[in-house]
Image (spheres, rainbow, N blue to C red):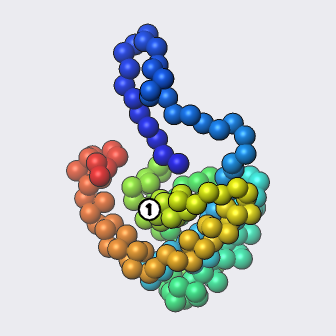
Amino acid sequence: MGSKWYGEKPNSELEMKILTPSVKHGGGSQMVLGCMSAVGIGNLHFIDGIMDKYMYLDILKQNLKQSAEKMGVLPHYKLYQDNDPNHNAHICRLWALYHCPQVIKTAAQSPDLNPIENIWDHLINRIRKFKIYSKNELREKLMSAWDEIEGNVCANLLKSLHKRLNEIIKCKGGPAHY
């Protein structure tokens, strides 16, 4: 849930004070897919196993229109997704061509330009304060925290997109400095 970087001299030993302890048992993770608009969030979908293009297509079929309706953006929503190979699979692109009013193409490896990345951070920060002992408990906390995300959080993230674009331009396509 985050990265830590330490600078050490070449061929030097790591000092115990900078090592982060980890637990090698228990715990767990949960992959999710969700969507957002300037007015709020759509459905949150839990993924079990490894997602392939067929699973992704089923998730779109089950959730996209329902989420657009929930957010009040139907029928004029735009599908913005990253360049995951499953998203770009021929069957998924073909389905989107016939079922989405508009699909926005995005640059590869561009998390600074994808507002939902900030929603994931927001979600993680909300559940981090809980001691979670099972995958079911993790799912419950995720769903609860997801449902509590207010529309103004999404709206503010989308309003800040032009600032992120300007920062990326200033960094000549490199990672943003914020």
Q: Position of residue 89 (x, y in %)?
A: 66, 57
Nearest the viewer among 2 and 162 is 2
- Residue that appears at 69% across and 36% down: 24
- Residue farthest top in this picture: 11
The amino acid beneath tag 1 is Asn
Q: Is residue 17 left or right of residue 24?
A: left
Residue 44 figure quarter: bottom right
Q: Residue 6 at what x, y percent from top left?
A: 39, 29
**Residue 92 appears in the figure:** no
- Count of labels shown? 1
Q: Nearer the viewer, residue 38 or 83?
A: 38
Please tell me whether mark 1 sits on a helix, a strand or a loop: helix
Q: Which residue is mark 1?
A: 118
Q: Crowdedness of circle 1 by 10 Å Cα count: few (<14), some, many (20+)?
A: some
User: Left of 26 or right of it: where is 156?
Assistant: left
- Which is nearer the eye, 150 or 47? 150
Q: Is residue 138 visible?
A: yes
**x, y percent for residue 52:** 73, 55
